Structure formats: C-alpha cells, structure tokens
Image (spheres, grey):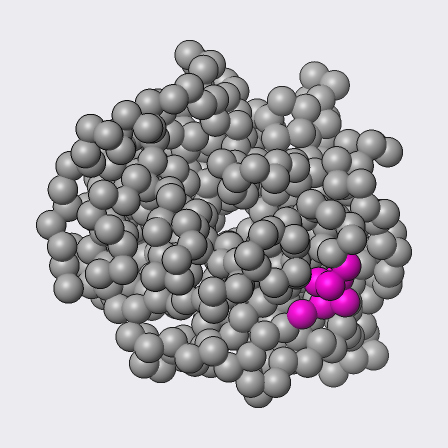
Amino acid sequence: MNKKHLLLSSAVAGLMVFSVTPTTFAHDMLDDAFVEKGQEGSQSLNQIPILEGSKNVGNWREVGSVQLKQYDGVQNNTADVYAHKGYAYVGTHTSNGGEGGVRVFDMKDPSNPVEVAKFADDIPGTWQEKVIVKKVNTKEFKGDLAVVSVQQLNSSNPDSQGGFLLYDVTNPESPEKLGFWEMDKRVPGTHELYLTVKEGKPFVLAANPYADYYTHGEEKDFALVDVSDPAAPETIYEFDPRILPEVDEDFNGYHWNSPDGKTRPVFNHSTMTDNNGDTALLSFWDLGTIILDISDPYNVKFEGRTDYAPDVQGSAHSAALAKGGNVLIETREVYNPTKAGYEESYGYTRIFDIKDKKNPKLLSTFKTELVDNVEDGVTFANTVHDPKVHGNTLYLSHYAGGIRAVDITDPSNPVQIGNYNPEDGYFWGTFVDRNYILGSDMNQGLKVLQKNRSSK
C-alpha cells in the first residue's frame, strides 16, 4: 500500500543536523565498527593473515597478472572490473588519495594485458569504483557508452562532487567525456551503478548511499536516470522506502525501526538488472534486496523484497540473477561478526527462488570456511563480496578468501567446485567473459584466468 511521503518532523530533522564528514569506503560508514577495506604494504588494516591458496579454480588457471600503472609516483589499488569487446575496465579504490580513475586494458593477449588508457579522474578528491560499458544507439549518441561512479573522499573538500560520469569509449584507447550526473554536495556520491539498454535507449541505475539521510529526504538512495543524451542525463524515478507498509513515514533515511523490534541500518549499496532490463534489484542493506518492475522505466512498480530473521544481520550488498531470472543470488557484506543481538557470523551468500517476485523464497545459503572465524574480529577479509553468474556456475569474490566457484545447478544445494586464491590475493570483484575470468586484486592488480587447454 502506497503511503504519501510526509515531511520529516522538526524533531527528527533536528537530530540529523549534526556534523558528519562522510568518508566513503564502500560499506556502512555510519556504523560503530569502522575498518577500511584495503591493505597497504605489510600494515594490514584488517589484521588478518592473508591466505595462501591455489592459482586454479576448477578447470580455470591464472594466465595473466598485471599491476596498475603508477601516475606521478602514486600507486592506486583496484576496485571493480568489467569487460567489453576485448578490453577490461578496472575501477580504483581510495588507496593513496583516490583519483585513480578507470584503467583500460587491451586483452588481445590475455596472458599479457596492456594498460592503454586512464579516464574519469578529473574531479578532485574522489574515487571511481564501478564502471559499466554498453553499446548505445540514440539520436544524441551512437557508440560504446561507459558510466562511472564518482564518490567524494571528503565532502568538506570544496572541489569534490559525487555522482556518475559518462564517457564515449567507442575507441577504448581514447575515451571522451560526455557528461556528469551531479548529486547534492551533502551526499558522498554514486557508489555502485548499472547501465541497461532497452530498445536502444540507455538507463543508469544509481545506488547513492545516504542520499536520503544527508538531504533529509529531498533525494533518495536509488535513482533511475535516462541517459539517452549523455550530455544531459535526466532523473525519471527515485525509490522511497516509505512506500512500504513496514517503513514509518518519519523514517530518517538510515535508522529503520523494523518489525522485529530492532533499529536496523538501511541504505542502497548497489543495483543491477536482468538481461532484458525489465527487473531491477536494489541491495538495500537491512531492508533486503528490493525487486522493482522497470519494464516501463517511466512507470516503475515495486514487486517484493527479501527479508531476514531477527538474529540475522541484513547487509544486502550485491545481487545477481540465475536460471533465466528466476533465481536471486544475494551477497551480504557482514564484517562485524559479533554484533550484539545477531548470530556470530561473517557475511555469506543467500539464494532465493523469485519466480513469484512478490514472495521470494529462501532456497539455500552458501558459506565458506571463513564465515565462522569470529575471533578474527572486525574485518572484511572473511566476508563474501560480489557475485557473478555464468550458466550454472556462481563466481564469488571473497577478499582474502579469493574467488570461489560454486555449482548452482541445484540452487537449493550449492556446491563449491573451485577456489582461486593466489598468495597475498585480496579480491574486490570478478567478471566472467566469454574467453576469460577477470579478478580485481586490491593488492596485485588485474588477474586473468583461462580454461586449461586439457579441459573441455
């Protein structure tokens, strides 16, 4: 049942006008258990020994490994990775001051990726995690369009600004800037995003954590943006959690008084769509994975969401689809395994049947051997991160746990079939291409896996 969005009461608004300097590191930056994701040299910010493992995963083996180029003596570390038409696009994290931009690698020889370009690094005091590239054909633009998330390192920097950038990468070795979707200065920026194309028309789905909270409801954490003209992106829809009957009208954008009696954190961390761009998945932390019908982007409809038992931290981080869109993979980035009132566990993966999107049904969970190592304390090393699906195989990046390959032929019984975990590996993301699997290693750069020649 839709509820009219009311203005926040002055009492609630007053609570929100405290001084906070957002420093975004791609997780819940407003919780009490703060720890950065990365590592620098021998000083691990996670204080967890890095695992030593195998350079093989199933019948795939490592064939290439290359560190990002340094610019002006600065070594940035990797964030997410994407591939398009024989090129790999690698985002960068906050290490050494951000501003690492997106790195483009020529993948003609997968055993020897060559960094050929750097772009989206022109906004001071920002970092660029996510990049998606798709072929677009509109009246205003025809070619390969790249969208890049932009987040402020510190919103007190007068020169920084969050949002997402749009680039022409028809020639990947010479990207050209087309436009910038700019957010309210109070908001850190767009954390993750997705680009979908419907009948040639491109739309960006932008996850903007804490937009609702920092703007007192003026902007929302999820925006659907028409980028048919990349020079003039147009916001056409925002998702407001207050339309849900279980969310109070005076919800302050972050602290949710959930039906289980707990006050849970809520913000949109990431988003993606099915192959047709008809269904959108919004990872909304403890509100679960929100399922939207965007088959008509100008008439978006809420369909359903996942939820959690009272003793389970939500932390819905990322999502993927399998089995023709009937199965939802939900990864949960739990890095504080001993949070009061919840099970003692790091983040693990949940698998749902969503044939009836109004009523997602939990089929199974997939846990690694790291999940129960709660004595390791607050760390990202032991939690799952991002999912990708190729056929009946689910690939999961697991930070210090490497890249896991999981057989989901039977989604109610996921079975690990491989673990790629080179020495000192620390994986942010993975991408499955026709000819290779890519991994973004925060310590060592871009990793490339290919099938063993002897494998079928």
Magenta stretch: includes residue 341: no
Q: Residue furthest left?
A: 4
Location of the C terminus by quadrant is bottom right
Could you say which is closer to the camera, residue 123 or residue 185?
A: 185
Q: Write down the quadrant of residue 409 in the picture.
A: bottom right
Could you say which is closer to the camera, residue 263 or residue 196?
A: 263
Judge from the rendering whether residue 41 lies leftward or rightward of residue 227; answer left or right: right
Q: Position of residue 339 (x, y in %)?
A: 60, 51
Judge from the rendering whether residue 218 lies leftward or rightward of residue 432; answer left or right: left
- At horizontal 74% and vertical 77% (from top left) the residue drawn is 417
Judge from the rendering whether residue 318 lies leftward or rightward of residue 365; answer left or right: left
Q: Residue furthest bottom?
A: 410
- At horizontal 29% and vertical 75% (from top left) the residue drawn is 358
Vertical placement of 448 versus 456: above or below?
above
Judge from the rendering whether residue 14 lies leftward or rightward of residue 47; answer left or right: left
Q: Position of residue 167 (x, y in %)?
A: 41, 36
Location of the N terminus by quadrant is bottom left
Q: Position of residue 399 (x, y in %)?
A: 70, 52
Q: Position of residue 434 (x, y in %)?
A: 60, 67
Vertical placement of 306 versus 455: above or below?
above
Which contiguous range is marked in magenta?
367-373
* Badge count: 0
Magenta stretch: includes residue 372: yes
Could you say which is closer to the camera, residue 224 or residue 165?
A: 224
Q: Write down the quadrant of residue 71 in the picture.
A: top right
- At horizontal 45% and vertical 15% (from top left) the residue drawn is 156
- At horizontal 70% and vertical 38% (from top left) the residue drawn is 38
Vertical placement of 258 versus 122: above or below?
below
| Magenta stretch: helix, strand or loop mostly | loop
Can you see residue 228?
A: no
